[in-house]
Amino acid sequence: MSHAGSGSTRRDYEFKAGVNAYLSGVAPGAQVRTLDDIVEFNKRNAGANLPFFGQELLVRAQAKGELTEAEYLEALEKCRRLAGRDGFDAALDQDQLDALVAPTTTPAWPIDLVNGDQFRGSSAKSAALVGYPLISVPAGTAMGLPVGITFMGRAWSEPTLVKLAYAFEQATKARRPPQYPATNP
């Protein structure tokens, strides 16, 4: 199982468990109460709910079992070890750093009905895999689209990250109120 595979496996299990937990508390009489109900609802109403894209992620997550299964527990341990002790912590220790800073993600992209999303990565993945804190703040614009910067730290470093993010915000004044143009620039 690759590192990315472990993260995907873990995500699928946790997505199913989280959606099912949330839906278990919805009002009586709701049309959907489980992830499986959502998948089946979408199949019955595919014309309205799935006009451009399928529900492969939902189906893949629905196929997973409980958070007690060996496959999930192995993926969880691998993510925590590789992203945490052997990844994040090692990188911070090597250069005696308080935080890692990186662009949050690429600017937004237009919807592409042929090729799908053009998502090209996120700096937050490593911190998210291990459950470490991060904070993203506006960093400016690229071709008129907002971009952010992410401050990531080791476990329990929230006070340091808030100080760093606040200092960045004060120094750059990069945040701009949202605009709602009729078309993209």
Image (cartoon, rainbow, N blue to C red):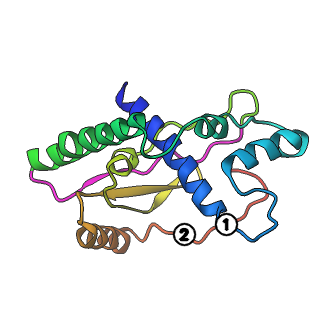
Q: Is residue 72 left or right of residue 62?
A: left
Q: In which quarter of the image is residue 164?
A: bottom left
Q: Looking at the picture, which amino acid does disc 1 mark?
A: Gln
Q: Looking at the picture, which amino acid does disc 2 mark?
A: Arg
Q: Mark 2 points at which residue?
A: 176
- Residue at (43% x, 51% y) in the render: 104
Residue 96 rendering spot, x and y as whole percentages: 9, 53
Q: Residue furthest top?
A: 1
Q: Residues within 10 Å of mark 2 (few under 14, many from 20)?
A: few
Q: Quadrant of residue 182?
A: bottom right
Q: In this view, does 73 lie above or below 150?
A: above
Q: In this view, does 112 lie above or below 142?
A: above
Residue 86 rendering spot, x and y as whole percentages: 19, 39
* Viewer-side residue, 89 vs 33: 33
Q: Residues within 10 Å of mark 1 (few under 14, many from 20)?
A: few
* Viewer-side residue, 32 vs 101: 32
Is residue 75 visible in the rendered image? The answer is yes
Is residue 50 visible in the rendered image? The answer is no
* Viewer-side residue, 6 vs 92: 6
Magenta residue check for 56? no
- Residue at (28% x, 42% y) in the render: 83
Residue 74 rendering spot, x and y as whole percentages: 34, 36
Q: Mark 1 points at which residue?
A: 179
Whether label 1 touches label 2, CB < 8 Å: yes
Does dot 2 land on a helix, a strand or a loop?
loop
Which image quarter holds the N terminus?
A: top left
Determine the main secondary structure of the stretch shown in magenta: loop
- Residue at (71% x, 40% y) in the render: 111
Q: Distance between the residues labelled 1 and 2?
A: 9 Å
Residue 56 rendering spot, x and y as whole percentages: 67, 33
Q: What stretch is highlighted in magenta?
A: 96-111
Does dot 1 land on a helix, a strand or a loop?
loop
